[in-house]
Image (cartoon, rainbow, N blue to C red):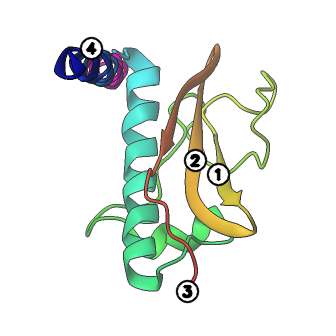
Amino acid sequence: MVLRRMALPTLLLAAVALGSMLLLAGCQRAKFYGKDREMMHAAKLIAGAIDTYFREYSEYPDKLREVEPYLPPGETWPVNPYNGKPIEDTCSIDFDPATSVGMVAYERVWRDDQQTTYQLHVYGEHGRLYVIGNTIVRLKE
């Protein structure tokens, strides 16, 4: 009888975990087209540079452009596919159709006075396309 009582919570936990994984997998398959697709490619280059910077310094940069030297070899800073100018940090996660289109908002995430990760909010013509973020939680020693 005790075994049956323990089996049900274990099955429920497994079902919740499986559902969460399927939900996350679905989010990763978001489809983008045209300039939104170009914008996502550019944002992924920037996110990769942020991750490379983190691996070298064990912290995230204060300013987004500090990661420019960490872009893959041969890559230059990505351009905004909507206006052809370099992608900039809007410094605000709020979408403004006048200034946010084709831009990103870089945000360092803190918990209990410890920087734990970052989020890169990616904006397209009609608002936020995606939020790229690292899930590593690093606490200072």
User: Which label sits on residue 8?
Assistant: 4
Q: Return the mark for residue 106.
A: 1
Choose between 128 and 33: the one closer to the eye.
Answer: 128
Q: Which residue: 42% across, 43% down?
A: 42
The alpha-carbon separation of the residues under discs 2 and 4 comes to 37 Å
In primary-sequence order, the first of circles 2 and 3 is 2
Q: Name the residue under label 3.
A: 141
Against 129, is 103 above or below?
below
Query: How much space separates mark 1 and mark 2, taking CA atoms?
Result: 6 Å
Q: Nearer the viewer, mark 1 or mark 2?
A: 2
Q: Looking at the rendered structure, which numbered label has been put on residue 54?
A: none
Disc 3 from disc 4: Cα separation: 39 Å
The secondary structure that most of the magenta stretch takes on is helix
**Quarter that holds the C terminus:** bottom right
Residue type at mark 1: give it: Tyr
Residue 86 in view of the camera = no
Q: Position of residue 99 (x, y in %)?
A: 78, 33
The N terminus is located in which quarter?
A: top left
Residue 59 in view of the camera: yes
Q: In this view, does 34 lie to the left or right of 62?
A: left
What residue is disc 2 on? 119
